[in-house]
Image (cartoon, helix red, strand yellow):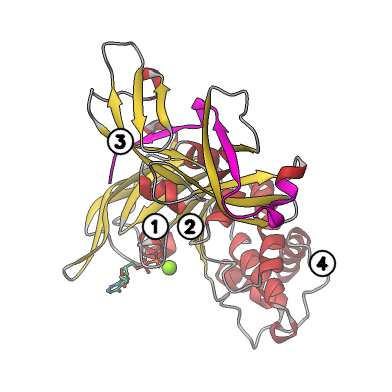
Amino acid sequence: MTGSSAFISVRSVSKAFGRFLAIDNVSMDIAQGEFFSLLGASGCGKTTLLRMLAGFESTTRGEIFIDGQPMSPVPPHHRPVNMVFQNYAIFPHLNVRDNIAYGLRKQRLPRARRHEMVEEMLELIKLPGFGTRKANELSGGQRQRIALARALILRPKVLLLDEPLGALDKQLREQMQLELRALQRKVGITFVFVTHDQEEALTLSDRIAVMQGGQVLQVDTPAGLYESPNSRSVASFIGNMNFFRGTVRRNGAANAIIETEGLGAIPVPDSRFARPDGAAVQVALRPEKFAISPTKPDAVHAVQGRLANSAYLGERSHFYITIEGRGEPIAVSAPNHNRFVANAGSHAEDTPLWLSWSSDAIVVLDPE
Ligand SMILES: Nc1ncnc2c1ncn2[C@@H]1O[C@H](COP(=O)(O)OP(=O)(O)O)[C@@H](O)[C@H]1O
Ligand SMILES: [Mg+2]
């Protein structure tokens, strides 16, 4: 994304708490209307970054621009943002209508207009007629929708959501994810969404910033992160990945060959990869990029191995396969397309089998 289309622009921002650097020189741009997620393990700095966007924390270095305006002189209540927290901050003594209308009270709107706006919101969050319910008569999912409605009624340009679904059980969380995504599309507000759950981030987001130790490792679309991770950290944080040590052999040819530990020599087009002769690399392949067969497949890239372990999971099976030249078994995830896969639960240990892959499934990374 170019700087000019950025609605939120984070420029070389750091945040120190005493001598501890919680955010370390982060830069990123978020477009208007984007569903953008900050994804990373607990403690990586997601909340701190969100709080700096909201203005609850100052930046130690760098600047945040929203809609072209530098935010450091702007106090939280004058920023065009609103925040939704994990623990849904619903007032227990107020009914649903008064909870949703809470932020409107300074706007001196006529009572009828206020009620109308609340009804629109209840419609939007699929809880029509709930206005006079008490907060303690609501389920966790309903409370979270009310918290969303309360933020959305103020029509912020940006909604900041800090693990808003974290307290919900799995089934409700998945349902709320779909509703949240649909809601965001409908209202067109820019969402900056914090989660430590990679599946949640992949499901919801237009783009994701993967964070670690106060730094942003990669910003990309869900498919971009999954198919083209830029580092071992990102590759192993999102989904599962097999890594193979490799060495680049150029021999004057246009395309490089990578000699790998276990997978043999793999040609890699220079368009996707440029490293000098002799460079140490890591070749990465996801478990589902391998095809598995009991006999030698008709494929350019194949290797024979032996079954270490397998598990039948219904729609697919997982296999762990030992190959020569690699200590750790390769993890393979195969869709249940044939008997061989469907019988995963009954194959004997050490059964010989073949793995094949297409060279375009290969990701080449620097060693870490
Ligand atoms: N007010 C604070 N004072 C000192 N350290 C803090 C403060 N807020 C956060 N931190 C530290 O900064 C790091 C990032 O915290 P946080 O942004 O809450 O992470 P996340 O939301 O990704 O779990 C953590 O190590 C945390 O302990
Ligand atoms: Mg947090």
| Residue 94 screen position, x and y as percent | 66, 84
Crowd class of label 3 (few under 14; some 14 to 19; many from 20; radius 10 Å): many
- Residue 128's disc is 4
Q: CA distance from mark 2 to mark 4?
A: 26 Å
Q: Nearer the viewer, residue 327 or 60?
A: 327
Q: Earlier in the sequence, mark 3 or mark 2?
A: 2
Crowd class of label 1 (few under 14; some 14 to 19; many from 20; radius 10 Å): many
| Residue 281 screen position, x and y as percent | 30, 35
Crowd class of label 2 (few under 14; some 14 to 19; many from 20; radius 10 Å): many
Say which residue label 2 marks: 81
Say which residue label 1 marks: 53
Instruction: Name the mark nearer the viewer: 3 or 4.
Output: 3
Q: Nearer the viewer, residue 6 or 174?
A: 174
- Check if mark 1's residue and mark 4's residue have beta carbons within 8 Å: no
Left or right of residue 62: residue 268: right
The quarter of the image that holds ligand 2 is bottom left
Crowd class of label 4 (few under 14; some 14 to 19; many from 20; radius 10 Å): few
- Residue 281's disc is 3
Residue projecting furthest to the right: 129
Q: CA distance from mark 2 to mark 1?
A: 8 Å
Q: Earlier in the sequence, mark 2 or mark 4?
A: 2
- Check if mark 2's residue and mark 1's residue have beta carbons within 8 Å: yes
Instruction: Name the mark nearer the viewer: 3 or 1.
Output: 3
Q: Look at label 1 and name its amino acid.
A: Leu
Please identify the quarter of the rendering in which residue 296 is found.
Answer: top right
Q: Earlier in the sequence, mark 1 or mark 4?
A: 1
Q: Look at label 3 and name its amino acid.
A: Val
Q: CA distance from mark 3 to mark 1?
A: 37 Å
Left or right of residue 84: residue 173: right
